Image: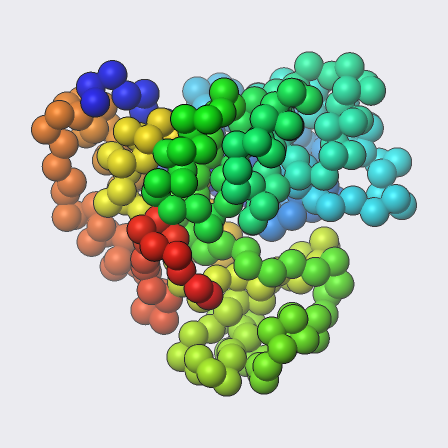
Amino acid sequence: MSSATIPELLIAAGSTVQAERFILAGADALLIGEARFGMRQPGSIPASELCEAVARIHSLGAKAYINVNKLFRNGELPELPAYLRTVAEAGADAVVFGDPAVLLNIRELALDIPLHWNAEMTGTNSAAAAYWGKRGAVRAVLARELNEEEIADFKQNTTLQVQVQVHGMTNIYYSHRNLLQSYMEHLGREASLVDRGPDKGLYLVEAERPGERFPVYEDPTGTHVMSPDDIFLLEAVPELITAGVDSLYVESLLKSDTYNETVLRSYRAALHRFASNPDFYKPDSAWEEAIRELQDPERELGFGFLYKQQVY
C-alpha cells in the first residue's frame, strides 16, 4: 500500500477568482470553460479571458482542464475550431470532451492537447475507454453508477488515467430543451414542479417519493435534472487510492464557495495524511464534521453507488 500514487484533487470553477480560492483550499486541478462549449459549469470564463485564467492557475501550481463536454448541433460546430485553437494557445493541460466532434477537430487542427474522455453515464467499461484511448484520450471519467469493485476492475484493464467523482450532486437526466415536460414524460409517472423561491431554486418531486427533491438546473445548453442527494466518499479515499484512481472530482455546482472550500480542505487533509503514513492511516472525524456543518439539511450525504447498486 505504501507505493500507491496519491491522486489529484479536481474541482470545477466558474471564474479565475474562484479558481484561486479553490487552489488555496487544496485543489490540484481546475475544470474551467465557457457556456458555449461546456455544460454545467458553475460560471463561464469567455475565450477572451482564457489565456489569463490558465496562466493564473499555472502560477499557483495547479492544472487547468477546459470543459468542452457539450453535445454539439451542426449550427454550433463552426465556432469550435477557433475555440480549440485558443485553448491550445492558452497552454491548457487537457480538454474534457464527450462529443467526437471535439476529438475530430483537434486532430484536424493538429493541436497538441491531452484529451479526457467524459461520456457521463456511459463511461462504464474499459473497452469503450480503450476505443477512445487509441484515438488520443489519456483519461477516462467514470460513470457515477460504478461500484468499488467495478472501478478497480476498470483501472486494472485500461492504460488510461481514471477519474472518479467523490463529492457533490450528479446529473441524472439531460435534455437540449429548456423544458421540464420531457423529464416528466421520461419518468412515465406523476411528477410535479416545486418552486421553493430564488434561494432554493426549482425541484422535481415524484408522487411516489415526496420527500426527495430533484434539483432542476438550466444553462444555455439545456435542462439538467440533478440527484436528490450528494455523493460523499471522504471515508473511501484510501480504497480509491488503493484501486489506482488518478483523479478525485468534487462537483461544485449549486454550492457556495465556502462549502466547496471546506470540502476541498477535508479531502486534502485525508490525502495528505494517507501520503504521510498509508499503512497507519486513520481519518479525523473533524473533516466530516466540517462538511456536515455546512451541508443542506434537506440533502443527504451518501456513498452513491460505491458499495451497492443504487436506484434514484
- The quarter of the picture where residue 102 lies is top right
- The quarter of the picture where residue 181 lies is bottom right
Q: Position of residue 177 (x, y in %)?
A: 75, 63
At 78% across and 44% down in the image, what residue appears? 72
| Viewer-proximal residue among 158 and 24 | 158
At 58% across and 46% down in the image, what residue appears? 122
Q: Position of residue 201 (x, y in %)?
A: 54, 70
| Viewer-proximal residue among 153 and 133 | 153
In the figure, 43 relative to 273: above or below?
A: below
Q: Position of residue 92 (x, y in %)?
A: 61, 22
In the figure, 281 relative to 184: above or below?
A: above
At 63% across and 77% down in the image, what residue appears? 188
Q: Position of residue 248 (x, y in %)?
A: 40, 36
In the figure, 227 relative to 3: above or below?
A: below
Q: Is residue 10 visible?
A: no
Left or right of 238? Residue 263 is right
The mark total stands at: 0
At 70% across and 60% down in the image, what residue appears? 175
Give the color scheme: rainbow, by chain, secondary structure or one colour.
Answer: rainbow
| Viewer-proximal residue among 272 and 151 | 151
The quadrant of the picture occupied by the N terminus is: top left
In the figure, 233 relative to 246: above or below?
A: below
Q: Is residue 274 visible?
A: yes
